[in-house]
């Protein structure tokens, strides 16, 4: 099994580290400044092949990698935007079946998310497959995923074929208000402790001001105050942010099971003993509505901030 991870400017994509861990540290890093990505992987990697190549050329990369991957029955890529672009092309050149958005892989069975998150699908994979790994679903367990010693790092230089490919016209910065929650590095989430729909407009304005994304609980999506793609949890999106801030969220297991392993959790709640407060690095016992308003004022989010529709 091998991971293929596209790298932009030395940064691993969402789900990149989990994909490498799933492949037990065996990875090809392709893109620009792959050396920095090796450092970011740290002890997760055992054998790294770096292919330093400029731009993003998924069609040509797939053709060029066909020879390198010819003897690899299982090829894993992160289900990041670049991974989702590259995976079907690799599947085509290798003649392998493609399975997208895997949340679990064991023996010859892969489980994927289907129907916009409404169903979990189980597939029996044959001897060979290309699989994209859903960011946040697996997580990283340092105790079992980290390998001792330095990884073996080599460079590869597959020849880029002269075939037509997509052209990158412009790379736009990610818009936190509309990006896929699964890939969001910072999430401000509101729950039933927030008074009304207007609070979520304020939450969204605050999130926009600090380049964060908005998340929520099922209670709120059931009320129709936010769309389903903003719901975190077992019947929503699985996320894995670095920062997660919960305003008035109790921390029911159906919610926290979708949380991944955030580096920092802040919870604002009037109940000091609810599960979300126990989970938090910083637990603020306060009215979440008043705290939200105070933060908006502090950061300079005006009362009439127009935020439009919060969508995915
Ligand atoms: C099959 C199934 C699937 C589910 N899937 C999901 C899922 O995917 N995602 C999900 O989120 N839920 C899911 N749920 C629902 C889940 O069980 C909880 O009901 C839900 O997560 C609770 O949302 P909440 O924390 O917003 O609301 P509540 O549980 O009502 O908690 C509100 C919190 O706000 C606090 N609070 C109240 N007033 C204030 C205030 N003024 N200031 C600060 N804090 C205040 C309260 O102390 C409380 O902790 C599922 C349930 C089932 C049965």
Image (cartoon, rainbow, N blue to C red):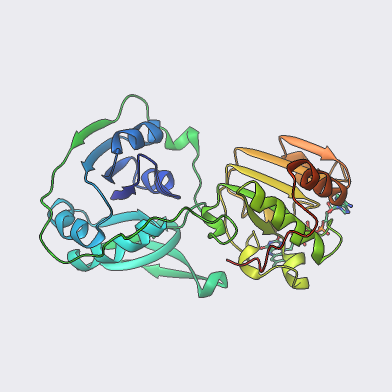
For the question of whether residue 70 can be seen, the reply is no
Residue 172 at x, y = what percent? 43, 56
Residue at the outermost bottom position: 115
User: At 70% across and 67% down in the image, what residue appears?
Assistant: 226
Q: Is residue 229 above or below residue 54?
A: below
Splitting the image into four quadrants, where does ligand 1 fall?
A: bottom right
For the question of whether residue 153 can be seen, the reply is yes
**Quadrant of res 44:** top left
Q: Is residue 11 above or below residue 149?
A: below
Count the marks: how many?
0
Residue 39 at x, y = what percent? 36, 31
Residue at the outermost top position: 149
In the image, taking residue 7 as reference, residue 180 lies left or right, namely: right
User: At 74% across and 50% down in the image, what residue appears?
Assistant: 301
In the image, taking residue 43 as reference, residue 120 lies left or right, namely: right
User: At 23% across and 40% down in the image, what residue appears?
Assistant: 50
Of residues 257 and 205, the one drawn nearer to the viewer in this rendering: 205
Of residues 128 and 85, the one drawn nearer to the viewer in this rendering: 85
Residue 85 at x, y = what percent? 33, 63
User: At 10% across and 58% down in the image, what residue appears?
Assistant: 161
**Quadrant of res 93:** bottom left
**Quadrant of res 255:** bottom right
In the image, taking residue 10 as reference, residue 268 lies left or right, namely: right
Q: Quadrant of the C terminus?
A: bottom right
Residue 87 at x, y = what percent? 30, 61
């Amino acid at each position: 099994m091998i991971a293929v991870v596209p790298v932009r400017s030395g940064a691993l994509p969402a789900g990149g580290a989990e994909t490498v861990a799933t492949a037990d540290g065996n990875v090809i890093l392709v893109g620009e400044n792959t050396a920095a990505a090796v450092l970011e992987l740290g002890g997760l990697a055992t054998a790294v092949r770096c292919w330093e190549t400029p731009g993003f050329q998924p069609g040509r990369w797939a053709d060029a990698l066909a020879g390198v991957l010819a003897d690899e029955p299982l090829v894993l890529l992160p289900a990041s935007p670049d991974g989702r672009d590259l995976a079907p092309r690799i599947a085509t050149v290798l003649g392998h079946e493609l399975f997208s958005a895997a949340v679990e892989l064991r023996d010859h069975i892969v489980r994927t998310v289907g129907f916009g998150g409404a169903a979990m699908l189980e597939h029996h994979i044959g001897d060979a497959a290309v699989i994209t790994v859903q960011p946040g679903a697996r997580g990283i367990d340092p105790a079992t995923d980290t390998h001792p010693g330095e990884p073996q790092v080599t460079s590869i230089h597959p020849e880029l074929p002269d075939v037509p490919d997509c052209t990158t016209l412009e790379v736009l910065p990610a818009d936190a208000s509309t990006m896929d929650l699964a890939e969001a590095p910072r999430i401000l989430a509101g729950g039933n402790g927030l008074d009304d729909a207007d609070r979520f407009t304020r939450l969204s304005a605050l999130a926009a001001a600090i380049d964060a994304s908005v998340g929520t609980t099922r209670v709120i999506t059931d009320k129709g105050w936010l769309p389903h793609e903003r719901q975190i949890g077992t019947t929503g999106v699985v996320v894995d942010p670095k920062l997660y801030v919960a305003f008035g969220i109790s921390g029911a297991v159906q919610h926290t099971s979708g949380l991944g392993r955030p580096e920092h959790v802040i919870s604002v709640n009037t109940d000091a003993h609810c599960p979300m407060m126990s989970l938090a690095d910083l637990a603020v016992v306060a009215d979440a509505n008043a705290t939200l308003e105070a933060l908006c004022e502090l950061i300079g989010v005006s009362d009439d901030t127009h935020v439009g529709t919060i969508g995915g």
